[in-house]
Image: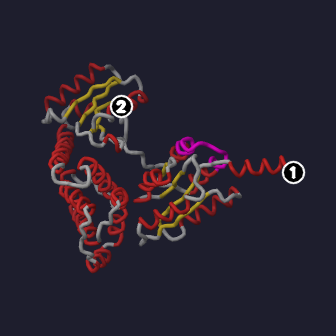
Amino acid sequence: MFFALHEERTEEREERVAVVVVMHGNGVASAMADVVNQLLTAACVYAVDMPLDADPKHIYEQVKAVLQPVVSQKGVLLLVDMGSLVSFASFLEKELAVPVKVVSAASTPHVLEAARKAMLGYALNDIYEEVKAAAPFYVREPLWEEETADQDMLAIVTACFTGKGSALALKHILETYLQLDEHMWRIIPIQMADVKEARQTLSSIAKHFRIVCVVSHICLDERIPHFPLEEVLSLRAMKEIQALADVEEIHVHMARELAGHLRHLSPTKAIHAIRAALAAIGRELGLDPDGRDMVGLVLHLCCLLDRLLSGEKTSSGQGTAIECRHEDETLYRVVKEGLFPLEQRYGVCIGEDELCHIVHFFRSLQGKQDT
C-alpha cells in the first residue's frame, strides 16, 4: 500500500506542457479540444472560445484564468488561428513567469500532435518545433528583442556563398547608388559557409543594428525584406531599397524628435511596437501599404499612448463607434484586435473614437489599393 500510494503521488506531481487552443467563433476551440481529448482519452487540452464580438482583453483574462491552476514550469503551448490571439504569448509569459510559445493557423492535427507529445513529457521547445514544422503559416518571434529595441543604427546586409569579395562588391554598388545618412547606416558584408551560419550571423548583427533588408542568393529570414543578387546587380532593386531606407530614416528622426516631448514612454520602443501592430492589421486585411502612408498614424499613436499613460481621457464616441462598426464590422474587429497588444503592453484602453479614426484610415488604404 505504501509503494502504491507513493507511485500515485509521483504521477500526480509529473509536470507537462499545458496545451491551450484559442480560436475565433462560438465553440470552435471547444470542439477542436473535445475531438483531441476524446481521441487521446484524456483531458489534456484546454480551450477558450472567442466570439467575433468579444473584447480581446476579456478573452486574454479567460486564457490566463484557465492556465493559472494548471500551468507548470515546463511552460505553455498556445494554438491559435489568427489576429490578436498571437500576441497573447508574450504577455502570458511575463504574467505567469513560465515559457510560452504560440503557433498560429493551427488545425486539429496540430492540436493532436501537440497534446500527444505533451502527454509523453516532451519539452516545450521540442513540441513547438515539431508542431510548427507542420503548420503552413506560423508567427515567428520578433527578430529584434525588446531590450535592444532602442538601437537606432540601421543596416543592410550583403551575403554571398562565393566569398566575402562578392559581398564587398555588392556593398560598393549599394553605397554608390543609394542615398543614405552615414550617421545612421552601415552596409555589412558577410560570407556564408552555410545557411545556418548566416542566420546566426544575422541574429548577432541584430543585437546592434536594425536590419532593414538583406541582399543574398537566398532568403535567410522571411521576417526581413530580401533582394536577390541579380536585382541589385542590375540596379532594378535600387528604387525599392531606397524607399525602405527613407521610411526607416523617417522613423529614426521621429523617435529623436519625440524624445523631448513624450513623458511616459520610450519613443523608439513605442514606434517599434506600433509599427508591428499596424503591420499585423495590414496583413490581416490583405494590405501592403507604402511605409510612408503609415508614418502619420505611427506619430498619432505615439502621442495618444503618451496621453493615455498620463491619465488623460478621450471622448467615448459611442455613437460614432456604433456607426463605424455598422459600416464594416469585419474591419472594425480586425483593427480592435490588432491594437490589443499595444493596450496590453502599456496598460491603457484606446477609446472608441480613436479606434474609429484608425478604422477609417485603413478603409482609405483599402480604397487606394482597389483603385
- The residue wearing badge 1 is 1
Q: Residue at x 28, y 33 (%)?
A: 215
Q: Is residue 347 left or right of residue 79?
A: left
Q: Is residue 37 left or right of residue 85?
A: right
Please identify the dominant SS of the magenta region. Answer: helix
Q: Position of residue 143 (x, y in %)?
A: 36, 41
Residue 182 — which label? none
Tell me, yes or no, if residue 121 can be seen here: yes
Q: Quadrant of residue 200?
A: top left
Q: How far across and how far down the image is residue 168, in percent?
A: 24, 22
Number of numbered markers: 2
Residue 337 is one of the magenta-drawn residues: no
Considering depth in this image, is 38 or 57 the residue closer to the camera?
57
Question: Which one is closest to the eye, mark 1 or mark 2?
Answer: 1
Q: Is residue 118 magenta?
A: yes
Amino acid residing under circle 2: Ser
Q: Is residue 48 above or below residue 192?
A: below
The colour style of the image is secondary structure
- Residue at 22 percent of width and 23 percent of height: 169
The residue that label 2 is drawn on is 204
Compared with residue 298, is residue 354 higher up or lower down, i.e. above or below?
below
Instruction: Give the magenta range.
Output: 116-129
Q: Residues within 10 Å of mark 2 (few under 14, many from 20)?
A: few
